[in-house]
Amino acid sequence: MKQRVREIKYRGTVENRDAAAPLLTGNGDTVIVERGIPRLIIMRCPCGCGDDLLINLDKRSGKAWRHYLNARGLTLFPSYWRDDGCKSHFIVWNSQIYWCFGWGDAEGYETWNVSQSIENVVYTALPEDRFVKYDTIAAPLDVTPWEVLQACRQLVKAGKAEVDKTSTVGSFRRTKKQRKLSWFEIIFGGKNE
């Protein structure tokens, strides 16, 4: 029986694929192969199928994922999907795995909240006169594309931003006209729900 996991376990950096093998003992175990620059992530498939996933990080070798490694954990962008085998599709954000198609739609979505400080940084970076893709907004900021996407969603929900409904890539801008605050929000600083 498959035992899928909800987080990866970053096991470190190695110089070649052979050195990675003994470190990959459990589902979601992950290493980075680095020779001068990060070349590859090898991850034991978190779905439990037992396969090792080879995730290219080197643009010179074709399609490459971006990775972010910091105190919050490891993040991959974009999502990882398999066209063969187990057909897993998931997002890795701060070492947490968010399952997509095939395991339920973005399971754990309710936990995808970003801090007010990240939301403020993203709001400041959003233009008012045009729509911009969320991963483009992330590039100059010290945040991952997933954090920008979620901050934009939170801003849309708060009425501070809008999404381009004609695009399928997640483009956002500030709302041109801020809605008027209710008397309750002015006095108490929150919504009367």
Image: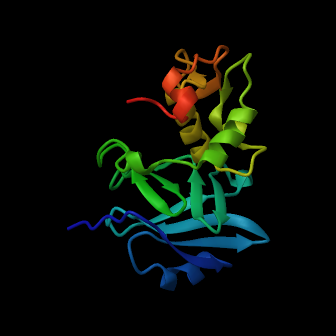
Quarter residue 10 falls in: bottom right
Quarter residue 17 falls in: bottom right
Residue 91: x, y in percent?
48, 51
Residue at the far front in the pictured view:
187
User: Would you say 173 lies left or right of 183 here?
Assistant: right
Residue 63 makes an appearance in the image = no
**Is residue 172 placed above or below 135 in the rendered structure?**
above
Residue at the far bottom in the pictured view:
22
Work out whether residue 28 or residue 94 is closer to the camera in this orientation and state it.
94
**Is residue 16 placed above or below 42 in the rendered structure?**
below
User: Would you say 98 lies left or right of 120 here?
Assistant: left
What sort of colour scheme is used for the picture? rainbow
User: Which quadrant: the N terminus?
Assistant: bottom left
Residue 78: x, y in percent?
56, 46
Residue 167 makes an appearance in the image = yes
**Is residue 25 placed above or below 73 in the rendered structure?**
below
Residue 153: x, y in percent?
52, 34
Work out whether residue 66 or residue 162 is closer to the camera in this orientation and state it.
162
Residue 149: x, y in percent?
57, 39
Label tally: 0
Q: Name the residue at 54% across, 15% down.
A: 166
Q: Name the residue at 71% across, 29% down.
A: 126
Work out whether residue 139 or residue 21 is closer to the camera in this orientation and state it.
139
User: Which quadrant: the C terminus?
Assistant: top left
Q: Name the residue at 66% across, 59% down.
A: 68
User: Would you say 16 lies left or right of 192 here?
Assistant: right
